[in-house]
Image (spheres, rainbow, N blue to C red):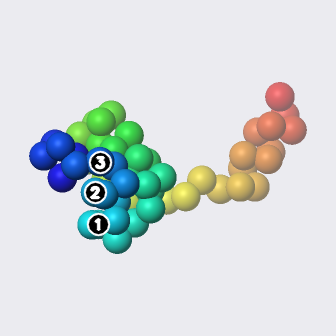
């Protein structure tokens, strides 16, 4: 939709998501292509806390 010249807001509305979610998907796609859109596990908050405490 965006490649057709529509705004991000219009494209997000058409896809049933908010503009921020669309932006996140576009960034994920732009890095490794379609493989970037594959679901991946959420980061473990406990591990992130442990890493920050050890620094």
Q: How many marks?
A: 3
User: Which residue is pictured at 80% across the width and 37% down the height?
Assistant: 52
Q: Left or right of 52: which side holds 3?
A: left
Return the residue at label 1: 15
Q: Earlier in the sequence, mark 3 or mark 1?
A: 3
Of the pair 23 and 53, the residue shown nearer to us: 23
Label 1 secondary element: helix
* Image spot of residue 11 (x, y percent): 28, 57
Against 3, is 54 above or below? above
* Image spot of residue 4 (x, y percent): 13, 46
Of the pair 55 and 36, the residue shown nearer to us: 36
Q: Left or right of 40: which side holds 4?
A: left
Q: Using the numbered discs, state the Cα–Cα distance from disc 2 to disc 1 in whole angstroms.
A: 6 Å
Is label 2 in contact with label 1 (beta carbons under 8 Å)? yes
Of the pair 30 and 40, the residue shown nearer to us: 30
Farthest-out residue, left: 4
Farthest-out residue, bottom: 16
Return the residue at label 2: 11
Of the pair 1 and 46, the residue shown nearer to us: 1
Please state, as top left, top right, bottom left or bottom right, where the C terminus lies in the image: top right
Against 7, is 51 above or below? above
Question: Mark 3 against mark 1, which lies toward the viewer?
Answer: 3
Return the residue at label 3: 7
Q: Left or right of 47: which side holds 18?
A: left
Label 3 secondary element: loop
């Amino acid at each position: 939709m965006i490649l057709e010249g529509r705004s991000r807001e219009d494209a997000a509305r058409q896809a049933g998501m908010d503009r921020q979610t669309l932006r996140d998907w576009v960034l994920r796609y732009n890095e490794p292509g379609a493989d970037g859109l594959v679901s991946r596990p959420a980061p473990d908050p406990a591990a992130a806390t442990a890493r920050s405490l050890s620094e």
